[in-house]
Image (cartoon, rainbow, N blue to C red):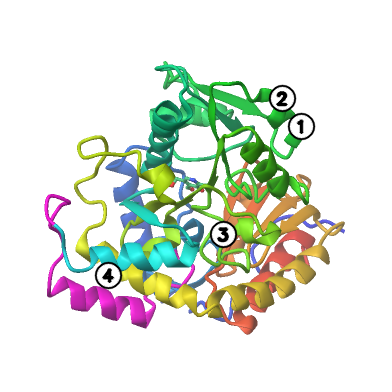
Amino acid sequence: MTGTLTEPTTPGTTRPAAQDGDAPRSQAYFQQAQERTAHNYHPLPVVVAHAEGAWMTDVDGNRFLDMLAGYSALNFGHGHPDLVAVAHAQLDKLTLTSRAFVHDQFGAFCAALGDLTGKELVLPMNTGAEAVETAIKVCRKWGYDIKGVAVDSAEIIVAGGNFHGRTTTIVGFSDDPDARDGFGPFAPGFTQVPYGDAAALEAAITPNTVAVLLEPIQGEGGVVLPPTGYLREVREITRRHNVLFAADEIQSGLGRTGRTFACDHEEVVPDLYVLGKALGGGIVPVSAVVADRDVLGVLHPGQHGSTFGGNALACAVATKVVEMLATGEYQERSEKLGVLLRTRLEGLVGRGVLAVRTRGLWAGVDVDPAVGTGRAVCEALMARGVLAKDTHGSTIRLAPPLVVSEEDLAWGLDQLEAVVTGA
Ligand SMILES: Cc1ncc(COP(=O)(O)O)c(C=O)c1O
């Protein structure tokens, strides 16, 4: 049975009723934000003022279960006490030097992240897109300096349906019209092949190919899982053709899928890990490219940089993030809670849901368009005290913080079930 979207008959237990006579304060905040910013987002009409763990509270005191976790930037939840403590302590000591000088948090962070990934060198940046740009530059430079590709001829293979960020180079190799239309001309040097098709990827390799850049799971695409064995085949093909494998684990990495990296599910080690989001603990933007010396060693002073990349506050927080991941506790939680997520969602297939894809505590849910658009489903969830995000029409992405309790997760899934089945 599929449902139609209605207001919940009983208000979410976690949401206090609005006080009589009070106009919701969120309306004024929302309107001001809409009037004074570029409309490059279409946010749900919620105005958050406070958050802790997996829960957010809006300016009117309504509580919402966060089922998005900042697109996985909040894997450890909002305001994780250990991360906040490290940030507070570092704020009192040193925040930024620029890379013109070395600070006391820098080496420790690079060593910790290098150890977590099993790689020799770490190049810290800030946002995910910057890390992807960094990886592209490093792969091209490696192609010219090490592989011997002729000047300005380097080619990088990317996948259909990719999402690697929003810079002009990156949107230039996207196939999403919203991401690219109106922003050309674009940088040459990228070849797109269908995601999940190893034979097509191998056929696209030329003597000028320097790298394959892939998301091991396509997050923005709707949590699209490649066929089993694909990543291992890509690893084998790239090795055979002397081509680098750059894995964009910005969204899939750092515990989200039940392993430290999504590549771990196939025991694949790429040449470059491209990381971001959760690396900053939900507190500061921290991204990084991690690789061995024979790859990252191609960069020399003056060839790449960032004023804020690897700043002391970022490094202190990110070192703590790596320390937390090194225990394996969060990966285990993700795997365990992921079983509940998968079981409950699979139970909705044929009942308002057409298909689900999950890995760890991460899911793409294709809602039956008869129920409503993804946006309408998210609005109905919001009315029940759950915040999630649609992508590409009728797909909902679920990525609760890994610290969510089993009980809260089950409650959030009850709300989804009620919305899609109309129960
Ligand atoms: C796989 C992937 N790469 C890159 C990015 C870009 O990261 P940022 O928004 O921090 O620039 C994202 C963001 O969603 C992503 O999911």
Give the labeled residue for mark 4. 316
Give the labeled residue for mark 3. 388
Mark linked to residue 203: 2
Q: Residues within 10 Å of mark 4 (few under 14, many from 20)?
A: many
Marks 4 and 2, Cα distance to the nearest angstrom? 44 Å
Q: Closer to the observer: label 1 or label 4?
A: 1
Q: Quadrant of residue 318?
A: bottom left
Marks 1 and 4, Cα distance to the nearest angstrom? 43 Å
Mark linked to residue 199: 1
Circle 1: residue type: Ala
Q: Which residues are magenta?
A: 74-101
Circle 4: residue type: Ala
Q: Position of residue 300 (x, y in %)?
A: 26, 39
Q: Position of residue 236 (x, y in %)?
A: 69, 43
Q: Magenta segment: does it hold 87?
A: yes
Q: Are marks 1 and 2 in contact (CB under 8 Å)?
A: yes
